[in-house]
Image: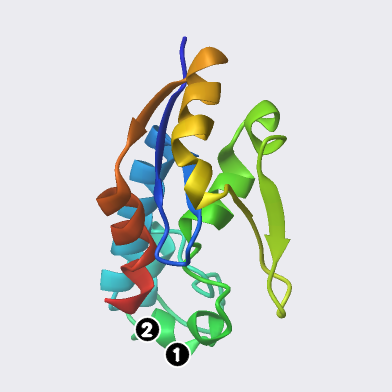
Amino acid sequence: MTQRLIGGASPFGYFVVVPEAELAREDQRIRSVLSARTYGEARKSDAPGADDDEFGDADPYDVGENGLMDDGDWPPNAGMLALAALPDDVKALAATEESMVGQEWVEFDLEKADEIVATLESMGYVVRRDDAAIQAFDELGNS
């Protein structure tokens, strides 16, 4: 089966490519976590910090209170998701970058986006360019 990738310009200034199905799954999970109001809801969404046994299912939950959003650990941006989800042959074409706090992601040169898409298509991938989808994903933590 041919893997479908979605690529686009990140608001952070680089081009990123992510498996389309994984982007959709993670987008839905992040939205679910952001809307969770109790630990029970958060646990159903596999939310960060929700596995703390100190809190019952009815206790209030706010992902913004566990510090992960402040540190940039959560939610992942598209480049971080790409690092975890892309096949190795695609990651080999990208640069792996690291932030000052140890977050890693993969990125492609934005000016070479068309060339990257053509290369990936020649490798047998189906690539759809959608800057708006990548940018919307990267803005989820700011909503």
**Label 2 neighbour load within 10 Å: few <14, some 14-19, many 20+:** some
- The residue sitting at 72% across, 79% down in the picture is 100
> x%, y% of residue 116?
53, 33
- The residue sitting at 41% across, 85% down in the picture is 64
Q: Which residue is mark 1?
A: 65
**Amino acid at dot 2:** Asp
User: Relative to residue 86, is residue 76 drawn left or right?
Assistant: left
Q: Which residue is mark 2?
A: 62
| Residue 99: quadrant of the picture | bottom right
Relative to the observer, which residue lies in front, 54 or 86?
86
- The residue sitting at 50% across, 57% down in the picture is 14
Residue lying furthest top: 1
Relative to the observer, which residue lies in front, 68 or 128?
128
Residue lying furthest front: 111
- The residue sitting at 63% across, 48% down in the picture is 83
> x%, y% of residue 138?
39, 63
